[in-house]
């Protein structure tokens, strides 16, 4: 097959294409299980295979994909025809940033292939969790497992040949209950990476899940009896269970270069960031250093090489509060430099990814991380807070289409007065303006508070692509924030 792909790439190049690539997926498998109040509500297994072909001709892309690989010539011809039609109307010719031609392999860290684990074992794992979650006050309990395994090979006309084997495991458990007013509250736990480990079946540590099942039930029971979050102006101390989403929505999406250039306006939205801002915009306080780091071990945002064949990188986005970088691929880096009239980006940041062989790669978050700080652990930060609230667990979110402001609700809050936690509150919310909020960052927890959270549901692109990524975040405190509105 690889020989045939190379011959097709050479043939289309000879017809005048400036660049051709093929992403061949020998297979991509997914397995999803949902247990709901003791019932196995869903078990879904899927398997697909095929190839996607991109052709660049006179500055325009053409794309074609098929799961039927019996006629590769037709598949490549279709992509070329699409590029020729698009070339008649191109307004800003596509150019690709330079890259090295690589012959490479990448396998995500996994010990026990979850697709070799019997279904009965997966169901037994969920049943055990369900039994643990079945406690007084819990009226609904849900636990789910998602496994993904894929093998893909990228070949391009610049001499790259990259093979990837990716295994993903996502796990979540959620309990819901109703308070005296009949309002529903929930508390959840999701599998994350709390140190360098692997992501096969072995990552579903029964002890870890048992401890957290006990904790989320206890915390939800406390929330059911709690007073409502007051309307107030306080410091908010965000635990990783909400800090990851704050980072995702108001740093990650805001710094996708295709959004900044307006390519997502019709669907996902734009960004308040402009090309003029790089190197000068004070995005946050000097305590804020953020990066797109696709090199951290064991994360869905670490994939070896992106779908342009560019190696995973550790790109500084915000350096001690100043905006310095973006989430980039080969095309957008070149376009941004051309539109800015100066070199903003030295090359691709290796963040161009597609969710399937039948989708085109677009700029996606890798691991959008916040560096740990010097302000101690959670206890230290609480002790040094006069009037605050500790928040955890994403519940709802509302974000301006250009990511300029936000409103989040969380599952639980702990009020802090004079350096100690005084009470638990329900229905906590907070809101802010993105830049003002990040500039109010007044404490960043040390490495002991840092946790790498997995995200499996980030939507972007037309047609929609639901992508996996990670967020490594410490506990952070922000001052003077509106809560309870
Ligand atoms: Zn997202």
Image: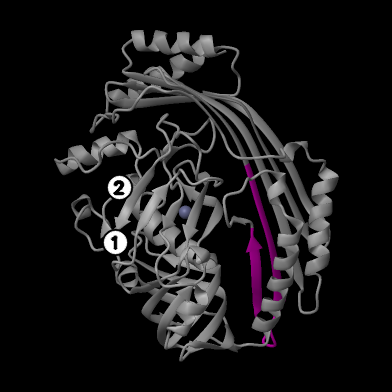
Helix, strand or loop status at disc 1: loop
Is residue 90 shown left or right of residue 308?
left
Disc 1 crowd, CA 10 A, few/some/many (<14, 14-19, 20+): some
Dot 2 lies on which element?
loop
Q: Is residue 423 magenta?
A: no
Task: Decide which of tag 1 and tag 2 comes sooner along the chain.
Answer: 2
Relative height, residue 355 to residue 455 (above, below): above
Q: Residue at x 65, y 76 (%)?
A: 185
Is mark 1 in CB contact (under 8 Å) with mark 2?
no
Which residue is the site of mark 1? 320
179 drawn magenta: yes
Asked if residue 85 lies left or right of residue 163, the reply is left
Q: CA distance from mark 1 to mark 2?
A: 27 Å
Residue 218, horizontal then vertical, whole percent: 71, 77
The secondary structure making up most of the magenta span is strand
Residues in magenta? 168-190
Residue at screen point 38% across, 22% down: 101
The quarter holding residue 320 reads bottom left
Residue 137 visible in the displayed image: yes
Which is more toward the observer, 272 or 373?
Answer: 373
Q: In the rendered view, tell whether residue 165 sits above or below residue 342.
A: above
Residue in the foreground of this view, choosing between 128 and 259: 128
The relative height of residue 152 versus residue 224 in the rendered view (above or below) is above
Which quadrant is the C terminus positioned in? bottom left
Q: Nearer the viewer, residue 432 or 103?
A: 103
Residue 255 is situated, as x and y percent measured from the top left of the image, at 34, 52
Q: Which mark is residue 262?
A: 2
Mark 1 or 2: in front is 1
């Amino acid at each position: 097959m690889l020989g045939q792909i190379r011959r097709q790439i050479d043939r289309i190049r000879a017809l005048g294409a400036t660049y051709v690539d093929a992403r061949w997926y020998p297979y991509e498998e997914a397995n999803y299980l949902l247990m709901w109040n003791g019932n196995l509500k869903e078990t879904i297994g899927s398997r697909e295979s095929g190839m996607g072909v991109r052709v660049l001709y006179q500055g325009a892309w053409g794309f074609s994909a098929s799961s039927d690989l019996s006629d590769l010539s037709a598949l490549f011809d279709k992509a070329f025809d699409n590029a020729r039609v698009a070339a008649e109307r191109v307004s800003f010719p596509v150019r690709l940033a330079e890259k090295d031609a690589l012959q490479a392999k990448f396998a995500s860290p996994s010990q026990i292939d979850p697709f070799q684990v019997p279904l009965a074992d997966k169901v037994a794992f969920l049943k055990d969790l369900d039994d643990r979650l079945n406690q007084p006050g819990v009226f609904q309990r849900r636990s789910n497992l998602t496994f993904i395994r894929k093998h893909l090979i990228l070949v391009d006309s610049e001499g790259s040949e990259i093979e990837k084997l990716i295994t993903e495991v996502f796990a979540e458990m959620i309990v819901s209950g109703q308070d005296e007013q009949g309002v529903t509250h929930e508390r959840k736990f999701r599998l994350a990476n709390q140190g360098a480990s692997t992501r096969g079946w072995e990552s579903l540590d029964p002890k870890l899940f048992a401890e957290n099942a006990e904790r989320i039930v206890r915390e939800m029971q406390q929330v059911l009896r709690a007073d409502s979050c007051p309307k107030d102006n306080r410091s908010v101390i965000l635990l990783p269970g909400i800090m990851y989403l704050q980072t995702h929505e108001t740093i990650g999406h805001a710094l996708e270069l295709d959004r900044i250039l307006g390519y997502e306006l019709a669907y996902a939205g734009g960004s308040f960031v402009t090309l003029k801002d790089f190197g000068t915009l004070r995005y946050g306080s000097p305590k804020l250093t953020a990066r797109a780091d696709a090199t951290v071990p064991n994360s869905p945002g670490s994939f070896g090489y992106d779908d342009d064949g560019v190696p995973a990188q550790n790109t500084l986005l915000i350096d001690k509060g100043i905006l310095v970088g973006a989430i980039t691929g080969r095309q957008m880096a070149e376009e941004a430099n051309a539109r800015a009239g100066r070199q903003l980006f030295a090359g691709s940041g290796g963040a161009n990814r597609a969710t399937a062989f039948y989708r085109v790669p677009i700029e996606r978050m890798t691991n959008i991380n916040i560096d740990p700080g010097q302000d101690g652990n959670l206890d230290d930060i609480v002790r040094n807070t006069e009037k605050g609230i500790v928040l955890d667990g994403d519940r709802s979110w509302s974000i301006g289409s250009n990511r300029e402001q936000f409103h989040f609700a969380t599952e639980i809050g702990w009020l802090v007065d004079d350096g100690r936690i005084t009470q638990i509150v329900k229905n906590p919310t907070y809101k802010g303006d993105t830049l003002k909020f990040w500039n109010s960052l007044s404490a960043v927890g040390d490495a002991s508070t840092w946790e790498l959270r997995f995200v499996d549901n980030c939507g972007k692109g037309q047609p929609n692509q639901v992508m996996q990524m990670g967020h490594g975040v410490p506990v952070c405190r922000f001052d003077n924030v509106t809560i309870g509105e």
